């Protein structure tokens, strides 16, 4: 299974409690694929929504123009459709409404010759949760240094 990671949303696990992850396809045009192959993408400000018609959309994924493209280059921050099964969409939508969760993109990667995006259901962390996680990481880091020094 050849997986090559293009981009990760590093702050996602810092800002959210990630509960369940899903793999989705993404609808792209030709120059977007070429920019992704060059490794140029930012998903830090992006978010995922489910429309009234049951389609899943990702907003604010910044894929810059392809350097060697022409006047038919793509729009950089347009919304893009995500490809999921209908049962997955209804299950995600139900969990979002009942548990008040958000859909967060965590990673874009190549899987074989396809471009996939990993999205996760997450609940936002409060400031004290972030501080507690940081303190826990510091303690673990000190323990590791103490054991291996």
Image: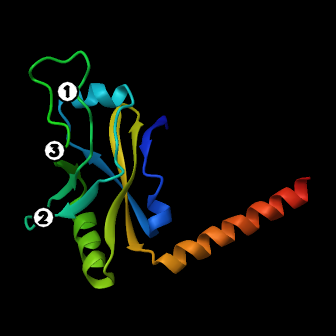
Whether residue 131 is situated above or below residue 76 in the rendered picture: below
Residue 82 image point, x, y percent = 22, 51
The Cα–Cα distance between marks 2 and 1, rounded to whole angstroms, is: 25 Å
Seen from the viewer's position, the closer of residues 49 and 112 is 49
Which quarter of the picture shows residue 138?
bottom right
Seen at 28% across and 70% down, the residue is 92
Residue 36 image point, x, y percent = 33, 31
Which quarter of the picture shows residue 77?
top left
Question: Looking at the image, is mark 3 or mark 1 earlier in the sequence?
Answer: 1
Seen from the viewer's position, the closer of residues 54 and 96 is 96
- Tell me the SS state at disc 2: loop
From the image, tell me which residue sits under label 1: 30
From the image, tell me which residue sits under label 3: 78
Seen at 25% across and 44% down, the residue is 26
From the image, tell me which residue sits under label 2: 51
- Tell me the SS state at disc 1: helix
Dot 1: few (<14), some (14–19), or many (≥20) neighbours within 10 Å?
Answer: few
Residue 98 image point, x, y percent = 28, 84
Nearest to the eye among marks 3 and 2: give it: 3
């Amino acid at each position: 299974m050849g997986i090559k990671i293009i981009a990760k949303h590093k702050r996602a696990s810092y800002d959210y409690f990630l509960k369940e992850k899903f793999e989705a396809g993404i609808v792209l045009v030709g120059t977007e694929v070429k920019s992704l192959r060059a490794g140029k993408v930012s998903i830090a400000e992006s978010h995922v929504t489910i429309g009234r018609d049951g389609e899943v959309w990702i907003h604010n994924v910044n894929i810059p123009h392809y350097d060697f493209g022409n006047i038919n280059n793509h729009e950089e921050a347009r919304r893009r459709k995500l490809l999921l099964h209908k049962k997955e969409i209804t299950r995600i939508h139900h969990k979002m409404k009942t548990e008040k969760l958000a859909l967060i993109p965590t990673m874009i990667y190549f899987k074989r010759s396809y471009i996939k995006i990993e999205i996760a259901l997450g609940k936002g962390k409060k400031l004290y949760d972030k501080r507690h996680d940081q303190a826990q990481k510091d303690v673990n880091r000190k323990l590791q240094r103490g054991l291996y020094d």
